[in-house]
Structure formats: structure tokens, C-alpha cells
Image (cartoon, grey):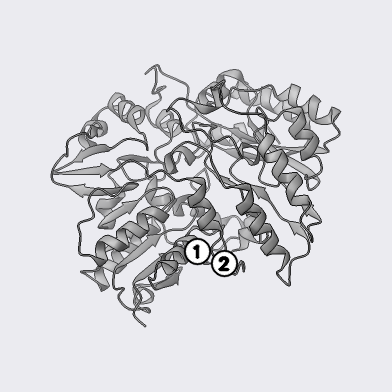
């Protein structure tokens, strides 16, 4: 069989809505394209096993950046840490490796890059593992076009254009090389400029915006970013209602087989997080009718035991906080509906569905948004413990993280008063701005809190504001110097002091 599209994937494929490529596969098939999957190719020969596609190869290293997957925050190979029971299956810089294998075996095939690893490397970026700046991944991969963020609309348009022998310029949510700079594009400082000036790198960081057409010159080419397409509730309803078998083959997704995605996006805008770089920075919620339809479908599966494993999104309680009226910061907007009325009503409606015993919220909540009415309902949906991520307790560090919102102690008191159960806390050390003094204060706090499940060392990932701080030693907004813990010794000391 000759496939129209072949996806080369750096992780196990599963036909489940939590697997991004599964959504793309089902959507393409719905539109009469045939799709093949090559999972975790080991050699160049593996790339050839499905032959050459009629339209394009889609390449992704998976849902986790390959360098982040393969190395710790201290740049040690994860497979050397036996406690993780980790075996490296994906090569370093997998998206580049896979693309070059394809280019070698199928010279004239079109290559479409996608996924987190490619999205966060679409412009000049700081690479922590190499400790230097790298050009857009489009150059090293020799790909024809890059899809950033969610890719449903982009993939359909790319397939349509190639089928009709039309050029790939102008597709929203993509990046492509060009010899010319089109009118209307905001020009970022060039690769050469940011390579020679950390101040210019900060200027580039401040201009990054998914909602605008951007361009960056690199040598004799421009990398063009076309603004992100608008996704709607109707779009999400269509995608998540596709006929998935829901069988899980990916280890880290086991236990989430009967999870239901309620929305996309996050309005938290944490400086260390890449979510805003992968979408429009807005919440897009599915309709209640669509979610209930999916829940009813789950109850008819022979292996369903009556429990929804997880109901939510990046932050479960952001469901229903949709707004697309301006480009301001939603979380600080007084006009945004933060009543939680839609998520409360949804939880109550799901409980009424015949065959449903429990609806669990495992994906965590944004505690600074959670009001008492929501907590009263949420306490019936907590599987023992609720995860929250304060990240730190120092006001200065929290400001550097852009997480200086809400009152943790007040939330803990309200949570306990309402009898909601136990909390589990996630913290981060060695973030730009964090000193040993801050780490000691955090250690004292965690001893009182007790349930600290995870303390991670900050890892600079491409294109985030925190990574810009780490690389430049500057606050990109003010250009003022900030303290950055750089040595492995201090990073380990900040982690060790928390026990």
C-alpha cells in the first residue's frame, strides 16, 4: 500500500486522543487521506519500511523533547540513573536525525516537521545541552515546512496544497524558508545579530508572539512564521469525537486510558513553560454536549470500570474561561469569567451519566484561581490527593517565574476547612533569580508542608522567557542583570537542601 502521509514518530503510537499524532491520523483519514505510522525508527532502513508517501513525511520526536527525554537538568544521560528504569530509544535531536534519514533515502520527498521539539526551535534558540545558540531547526533538518503547536488545521491545508500542486507559503500556524521578506511581517533581530548581542537576544524574546506574522533573517534566508490559526470549540468537538480505539501502548499514559480532555490552552503564562509558544495563549473549551457524548461512549466500552481517570487540561479548572476579545493577559483581566460555573456544572452532569462511578481530576488545578464553590465540588473528584504547583515561595523568584499570584497559605487553609483531602506540592529550584538563601527558605517551607512530591531543577528549554534569562543573565523586559545559578554544584546544592 502506498500511503498519502507517513508519520515518523519518536515514541509509541496509540490510537487515543491524548496522542497528538492519533488526532492528526484520524482527521486526515476522515478527509480521505491514507496514513501510515513509523514508530521509533532505529536506523535509516526503518525509514523505508512503508515506502515513499504520495504527499509528505510528517516528523516528530514525540510529546517530549528528545534532549529533555535523554538528559537530566545536570546534563547526565538519564539511562545512567538506574532508579528511572530508563532505556534510551530516541536519538538526541531526533527530529533532525529522522529528517536527514528521510532526505537521504527519499531525496525529493516533502518533509513536514511538527511537535514540541520542532515548535520550540523554529527561530534562533539557546540550546542548553550545547550551551550555544542554534539556527532554526528548519536548516539542520532540511525540512520543507514546520508546523508549530497543534497541527490539525495545518496538516489538512498542507495535504490539500500538495495534492493540488500549490505552494506552501501562507499557511497559518507554519514556518517556512523564504528568500524574500513579505510585507506586513514583524522582523525579529537576525540570527547574526542575536548571536553577537545578548541584548538583541532579549529583544527577539520580547517580540515572540504566536498571534503575529514574524520573520527572522538567517544568512540569505528568512524564516517566516505565519500567525497561529484560530481554533474554536466546534473544532475541538470534532477532533475529540473522532473514532479512537483508545488502546494505550505508551507507558507514561497508562492509567489515563479513560481520560477526557475538556479544553486546550493555558492563561497562566509561566515564564518557564512552553505552552504559550504552542498555541494562541487562550482557553478553548469543548462544548458540554461533546464531552458528555464522549463520556457516554466510554461507558459502552467492555473494559470500562466506571471511572473517568482524569477530566481536564493543562489546568483542570480553566475549563470555561474562554475569551478572545483582546490580546491582554487573561489571568489578570477583571472581565474574565472566573466563577468556575461551567466546570462545576460539567462535573455534576457527568456524575449523572449512567455507568459513571467516579470522575477524577488528576491533572492538577491552578490554585490561585480556585474559589470555594469550585473546591466544594472538587472534593468529590480528588483521587486521594490533589496536585498543585506553587513552584517556589520567594516573592522575588516567583516574580521571575511569573507565578506571583494568589496566596498559597490562604488556599491551604480554605482547602483544609472545606475538607477536600490532601495536597501534593511541586516545586522548582535553580530558576533564574533563585539564590541559596531562597532555597533555604523553600526548604523550611517544605518541611512544614510535608507532601512535597517533586522538586525539580530548572532546565532551560528553547524559546521560553526563563531560558532567555538563563542565557543572557538579564530580565528581558527591563534588561537589568539578574542572578542565575549556573554551576552544577549550586544546582545540586539547591536541590539537596530540600532533602
Q: Left or right? Give the position of 111 relative to 89.
A: left
Q: Residue furthest bottom?
A: 1
Tell me the quadrant of the picture where the C terminus can be found. top right
Q: Which mark is residue 431?
A: none
Task: Look at the numbered disc 1 and give the secondary structure of its residue.
Answer: helix
Numbered-mark total: 2
Read off the residue under disc 1. Answer: 22
Question: Badge 2: few (under 14), some or many (20 or more) residues near its Cα, within 10 Å?
Answer: some
Sequence-wise, the earlier of marks 1 and 2 is: 1
- Compared to residue 314, the image places residue 22 above or below, namely below
Kindly tell me whether residue 335 is visible in this rendering.
yes
- Compared to residue 152, the image places residue 372 above or below, namely above
- Compared to residue 459, the image places residue 56 above or below, namely below
Tell me the quadrant of the picture where the N terminus can be found. bottom left
Read off the residue under disc 2. Answer: 244
Across and down, in percent, residue 76 comes to 51, 49
Q: Residue at coordinates 32% horizontally, 57% vertically from top-left? A: 157
Q: Residue at coordinates 42% horizontally, 53% vertically from top-left? A: 115
Across and down, in percent, residue 390 comes to 65, 31
In three-dimensional space, the C-alpha distance between marks 1 and 2, rounded to whole angstroms, equals 8 Å
Q: Nearer the viewer, mark 1 or mark 2?
A: 2
**Tags 1 and 2 in contact by the CB under 8 Å rule?**
yes
Q: Quadrant of residue 28?
A: bottom left
Q: Left or right? Give the position of 155 relative to 217.
A: right
Task: Look at the numbered disc 2 and give the secondary structure of its residue.
Answer: loop
Across and down, in percent, residue 493 comes to 60, 33
Kindly tell me whether residue 71 is visible in this rendering.
no
- Compared to residue 28, the image places residue 137 above or below, namely above
Q: Left or right? Give the position of 143 relative to 289.
A: left
Amino acid at each position: 500500500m502506498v500511503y498519502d502521509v507517513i508519520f515518523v514518530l519518536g515514541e509509541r503510537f496509540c490510537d487515543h486522543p491524548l496522542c497528538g499524532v492519533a488526532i492528526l491520523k484520524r482527521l486526515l483519514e476522515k478527509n480521505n487521506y491514507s496514513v501510515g505510522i513509523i514508530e521509533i525508527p532505529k536506523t535509516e532502513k526503518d525509514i523505508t519500511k512503508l515506502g515513499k508517501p504520495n504527499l509528505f513525511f510528517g516528523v516528530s520526536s514525540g510529546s517530549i523533547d528528545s534532549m529533555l527525554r535523554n538528559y537530566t537538568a545536570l546534563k547526565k544521560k538519564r539511562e545512567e540513573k538506574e532508579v528511572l528504569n530508563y532505556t534510551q530509544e530516541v536519538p538526541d535531536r531526533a527530529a533532525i536525525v529522522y529528517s536527514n534519514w528521510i532526505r537521504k533515502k527519499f531525496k525529493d520527498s516533502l518533509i513536514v516537521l511538527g511537535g514540541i521539539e520542532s515548535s520550540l526551535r523554529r527561530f534562533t534558540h539557546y540550546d542548553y545541552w550545547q550551551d550555544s545558540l542554534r539556527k532554526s531547526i528548519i536548516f539542520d533538518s532540511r525540512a520543507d515546512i514546520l508546523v508549530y503547536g497543534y497541527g490539525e488545521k495545518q496538516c489538512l491545508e498542507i495535504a490539500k496544497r500538495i495534492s493540488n500542486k500549490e505552494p506552501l507559503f501562507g499557511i497559518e500556524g507554519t514556518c517556512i524558508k523564504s528568500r524574500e521578506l513579505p510585507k506586513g511581517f514583524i522582523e525579529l533581530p537576525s540570527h547574526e545579530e542575536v548571536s553577537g548581542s545578548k541584548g538583541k537576544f532579549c529583544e527577539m524574546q520580547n517580540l515572540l508572539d504566536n498571534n503575529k506574522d514574524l520573520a527572522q533573517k538567517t544568512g540569505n534566508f528568512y524564516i517566516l512564521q505565519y500567525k497561529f490559526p484560530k481554533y474554536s470549540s466546534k473544532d475541538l468537538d470534532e477532533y475529540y469525537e473522532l473514532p479512537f480505539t483508545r488502546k494505550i501502548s505508551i507507558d507514561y499514559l497508562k492509567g489515563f486510558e479513560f481520560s477526557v480532555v475538556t479544553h486546550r490552552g493555558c492563561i497562566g503564562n509561566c515564564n518557564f513553560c512552553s505552552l504559550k509558544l504552542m498555541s494562541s495563549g487562550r482557553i478553548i473549551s469543548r462544548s458540554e454536549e461533546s464531552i458528555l457524548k464522549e463520556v457516554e461512549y466510554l461507558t459502552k466500552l467492555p473494559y470500562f470500570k466506571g471511572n473517568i481517570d482524569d477530566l481536564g487540561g493543562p489546568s483542570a479548572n480553566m475549563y470555561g474561561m474562554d475569551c478572545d476579545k483582546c490580546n491582554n493577559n487573561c489571568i489578570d483581566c477583571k472581565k474574565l469569567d472566573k466563577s468556575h460555573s461551567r466546570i462545576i456544572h460539567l462535573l455534576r452532569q457527568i456524575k449523572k451519566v449512567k455507568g459513571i462511578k467516579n470522575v477524577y481530576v488528576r491533572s492538577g488545578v491552578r490554585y490561585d484561581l480556585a474559589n470555594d464553590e469550585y473546591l466544594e465540588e472538587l472534593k468529590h473528584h480528588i483521587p486521594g490527593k490533589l496536585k498543585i504547583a506553587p513552584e517556589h515561595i520567594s516573592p522575588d523568584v516567583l516574580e521571575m517565574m511569573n507565578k506571583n499570584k494568589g496566596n498559597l497559605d490562604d488556599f491551604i487553609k480554605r482547602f483544609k476547612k472545606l475538607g477536600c483531602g490532601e495536597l501534593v506540592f511541586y516545586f522548582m529550584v535553580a530558576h533564574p533569580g533563585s539564590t541559596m538563601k531562597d532555597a533555604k527558605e523553600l526548604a523550611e517551607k517544605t518541611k512544614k508542608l510535608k507532601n512535597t512530591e517533586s522538586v525539580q531543577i530548572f532546565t532551560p528549554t528553547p524559546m521560553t522567557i526563563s531560558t532567555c534569562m538563563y542565557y543572557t543573565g538579564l530580565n528581558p523586559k527591563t534588561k537589568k542583570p539578574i542572578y542565575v545559578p549556573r554551576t552544577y554544584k549550586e544546582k545540586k546544592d539547591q536541590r539537596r537542601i530540600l532533602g
